[in-house]
Amino acid sequence: MEIYILRHGETDWNREKRFQGQTNTSLNMAGFRQAQQCRKMVERLGLSFDRVYSSPLCRAMETAETVSLLSGNRIIKDPRLMEMDFGAIDGTPFDRDSAAAGLLFKDPDRYVPQGGGETFPQLLSRLQSFYEDLKKTEDKSVLIGSHGCAIRCMLVSFGYLKLSEIWQMHIPNCTIIHVELRKDGTFCVKNFYEIGKS
């Protein structure tokens, strides 16, 4: 199976560098333009998808709809693909050194969320649950719409990244990551496609 993981386009909170987590923000105009550019990149690469999955959050759905040219009712919304729940720091400035962020950036392995947020083991568990179900399908090529931190944790699940290294990887809005699901059930990261570079 060929898997294409799509990060959503820009939102106002991205531009303002605020934690979005599971807050239901929408794309801004720049985000819609990025999604349209991404659609053109998909066409240039000659990609097609048997099925499209997406986080149900608006910014991911709007991007998946634009890139796949499918209406929302033809996209499978799966809450397991949602962004990490950052709890009390949702909506606050993206400050790596703030007391509120705790060890989120400095030591993800030991991070304890505030205000009912998610731990990394919880996030990894729900993402792994999604991929275990995906393995049971007959699809040959799928598009998966998700979010920055969640996608980094997918790469951890695939053995591409260590959890301690996730914040060293920049994944621009509307990047597509090509991953191959091999016959032995393992995942291999094949390529990163960025708008304006592919």
Image (cartoon, rainbow, N blue to C red):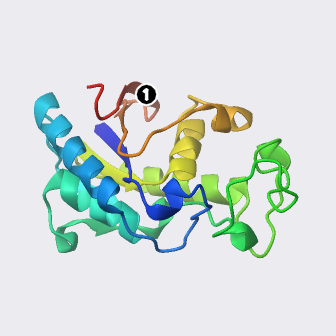
Place of residue 5 in the rendered image (x, y in percent of width and height, measured from the top left): 37, 44
- Residue at label 1? 189
Q: Is residue 135 left or right of residue 151?
A: left
Place of residue 59 in the rendered image (x, y in percent of width and height, measured from the top left): 38, 64
64 w.r.t. 157: above or below: below
Q: Residue at x 58, y 45 (%)?
A: 153
Place of residue 48 in the rendered image (x, y in percent of width and height, measured from the top left): 14, 42
Q: Quadrant of the N terminus?
A: top left
Residue 82 at least partly seen = no
* Front residue of 126 and 114: 114
Q: Residue at x 83, y 62 (%)?
A: 100
Q: Quadrant of the C terminus?
A: top left
1 w.r.t. 88: above or below: above
Q: Is residue 69 left or right of residue 80?
A: left
Place of residue 186 in the rendered image (x, y in percent of width and height, measured from the top left): 46, 32
Given the image, on which type of amino acid does mark 1 rest? Val
Quarter holding residue 169: top right
Classify 10 Å Cα crowding around label 1: few (below 14), some (14-19), many (20 and above).
some
* Front residue of 155 and 6: 6
Residue 134 at least partly seen = yes
Q: Residue at x 35, y 63 (%)?
A: 28
Query: Does dot 1 land on a helix, a strand or a loop?
Result: strand
Q: Residue at x 70, y 65 (%)?
A: 118
